[in-house]
Image (tube, rainbow, N blue to C red):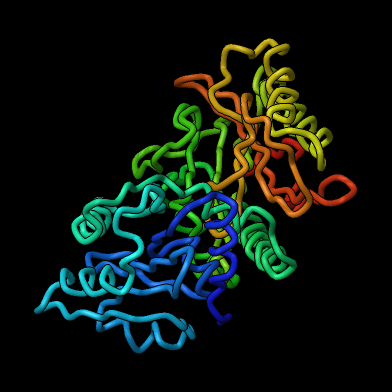
Amino acid sequence: MTSPDITSVQAVLNSSKLDAIAFVPGANFRRIMGTDFHLMERPLVIIVPAAGEAVAIVPNLEMEGFVTTGFAGKIFDWRDEDGYSDAFRDAAQALPQLNGSNRFGLEAQRMRAFEHMALATVFPDTRFVDAHSDLSSIRLHKTDRDIALLKEAIRISETALEATLENVKPGQTELEIKGMLMSNLFANGAEGLAFDPIVAAAGNSAQPHAESRPGYKLQRGDALLIDFGGSFQGFHADITRTFFMGEVSDYNRRFYETVLAANEKGRSVSKAGVSAHAVDDAVQIVLEQSEFSGYRVHKTGHGLGLDVHEAPQIMRGNHQELEAGMVFTIEPGLYRSGEAGVRIEDDVLVTANGIECLTSFPRDLRIIG
């Protein structure tokens, strides 16, 4: 566990001209505080002002763990039987400079409505603004430690995938294969799941965020799309590979090779100084100029780290330049509704000389079962 990095929050306050930022448990909390807590019905809120010391509103049952973070500001704890209103009121009294603020930032994509309402009650004349992207910018460039943890999450995940594929057979259900995959993730060292794994076959694979079915049994010629990732010390892998059961038609082979060419193009054009727009544009052109142009659905990728989806978004219209230390996915896909879907997803790190592909699982078309 590392000491709280309040200075990085203060730097965001200065650069964004914010008077304060409030945040709750989640990826930003973990990056700042060096640990995380459950996001539950009991509010735990940190407020960092531009001037003065930070304050924390903490459920009493979390106090023993919270004090070990080394948080140096004032802590206002509360018990279930008393409720949290007084703790919010006391925190506001410790921060009188914030009432009437025009720029009080909230972690708007993470904070719940009841936490916002509690803050609005005790800072009644304050204008709250969305500062989620401002605060999340502290995670945009990965440290050496971050990269090492990402690599371990990916190594665990790729090992688990290979162990799963060795036992996939026709007649199994998507849900059975998903269960094997999850078991193999934990057996190989995963501390959690990056997200609920997607294991989808045949027509179900044409749904980018498919639910695994308990009833459908895999048949010869089916596409099998697996999108998954293990977590290690808070960092997530996000990998997709698509396979075919027993055989593949010439049409599906061309379908697959088109996605593979788009993936290769994305990896080849990615480097520092190139915009996220340019990467997605290059990938989409490969798909658009193919015979399968009508089966495109989504952008090329997204940032990856303590959140599975974070900045930068690799999509047309985002002209943010890639910089060394950024990590994102390259995951083109094509989806023929009711028939088959193919997605090939890699996790890449921008370096001073180009990119380092953190995923190494083979991409060539593979027939299994």
Closest to the observer, 335 or 311: 311
Closest to the observer, 56 or 320: 56
Closest to the observer, 210 or 222: 210
Does residue 176 appear left or right of residue 117 in this picture? Answer: right
Q: Residue 36 sits in which quadrant?
A: bottom left
Position in image of residue 245 (x %, y %): 60, 37
Q: Residue at x 21, y 54 (%)?
A: 124
Does residue 100 appear left or right of residue 15 in this picture? Answer: left
Q: Residue at x 22, y 65 (%)?
A: 41
Q: Residue at x 27, y 68 (%)?
A: 92
Q: Residue at x 69, y 34 (%)?
A: 276
Position in image of residue 47 (x %, y %): 39, 66
Position in image of residue 174 (x %, y %): 44, 44
Give the residue at the far left of this rendering.
Answer: 81
Give the residue at the far right of this rendering.
Answer: 353
**Quick one: quadrant of the N terminus?**
bottom right
Position in image of residue 367 (x %, y %): 68, 38
Report if residue 345 is visible in the image.
yes
Closest to the observer, 104 or 178: 104
Does residue 23 appear left or right of residue 202 in this picture? Answer: left
**Quick one: quadrant of the C terminus?**
top right
Give the vertical position of 155 relative to 116 (above or below): below
Report if residue 246 is visible in the image.
no
Give the vertical position of 31 relative to 66 (above or below): above
Q: How many marks?
A: 0
Does residue 64 appear left or right of residue 206 in this picture? Answer: left
